[in-house]
Image: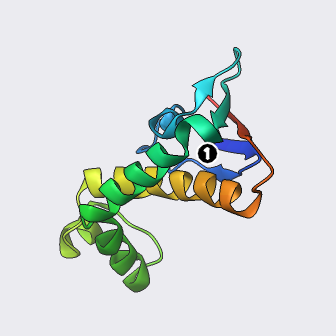
């Protein structure tokens, strides 16, 4: 069981590490009670790229991807063996969402908003 987000981008929040408001890091704004988000391309695109670059610069993405190349899952022991912290996993989860938002805008240049609904 897990929480999902859907709309112009879709995915599953990483269990126990990624909050439903992770999209706000990339400029998403809550719209209604069910946590509907939209990201304004004109207002947020440069910020999205900046956040993605900032996350990548930490090395967390490389560490987590290397861990996943060796193992299909993770726990504290696997993370420790691979030098991956809980913060690395959290950054990786947010990076995946940020990449989806950026790719949506890159692949749909006529779109000015990326909309998605997050489960609480």
Q: Could you tell me if residue 15 is visible in this image?
A: no
Q: Residue 49: give x, y in percent of width and height.
A: 46, 54
Which residue is rendered at x = 38% and y = 66% of the image?
74
Which residue is rendered at x = 61% and y = 51% of the image?
101
Res. 89 image quadrant: bottom left
Q: Residue 100: give x, y in percent of width and height.
A: 61, 57
Nearer to me, 75 or 22: 22
Q: Is residue 28 above or below residue 65?
A: above
The crowd level at tag 1 (other Cα within 10 Å; few <14, some 14-19, many 20+) is few
Q: Is residue 84 left or right of residue 101?
A: left
Q: Farthest residue to the top: give it.
A: 33
Q: Is residue 15 above or below residue 27?
A: below
Nearer to me, 96 or 114: 114
Q: Is residue 94 left or right of residue 77?
A: right
Q: Could you tell me if residue 92 is visible in this image?
A: yes
> Which quarter of the rendered picture does the C terminus lie within?
top right
| Residue indicated by mark 1 | 2
Which residue is rendered at x = 23% and y = 61% of the image?
58
Which residue is rendered at x = 39% and y = 49% of the image?
51
């Amino acid at each position: 069981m897990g929480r999902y987000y859907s709309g112009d981008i879709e995915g599953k929040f990483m269990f126990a590490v990624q909050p439903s408001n992770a999209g706000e890091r990339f400029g998403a704004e809550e719209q209604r009670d069910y946590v509907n988000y939209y990201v304004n391309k004109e207002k947020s695109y440069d910020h999205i790229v900046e956040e993605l670059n900032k996350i990548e610069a930490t090395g967390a993405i490389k560490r987590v991807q290397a861990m996943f190349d060796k193992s299909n899952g993770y726990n504290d022991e696997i993370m420790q063996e691979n030098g991956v912290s809980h913060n690395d996993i959290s950054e990786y989860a947010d990076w995946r969402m940020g990449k989806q938002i950026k790719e949506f805008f890159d692949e749909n240049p006529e779109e000015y908003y990326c909309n998605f609904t997050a489960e609480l």
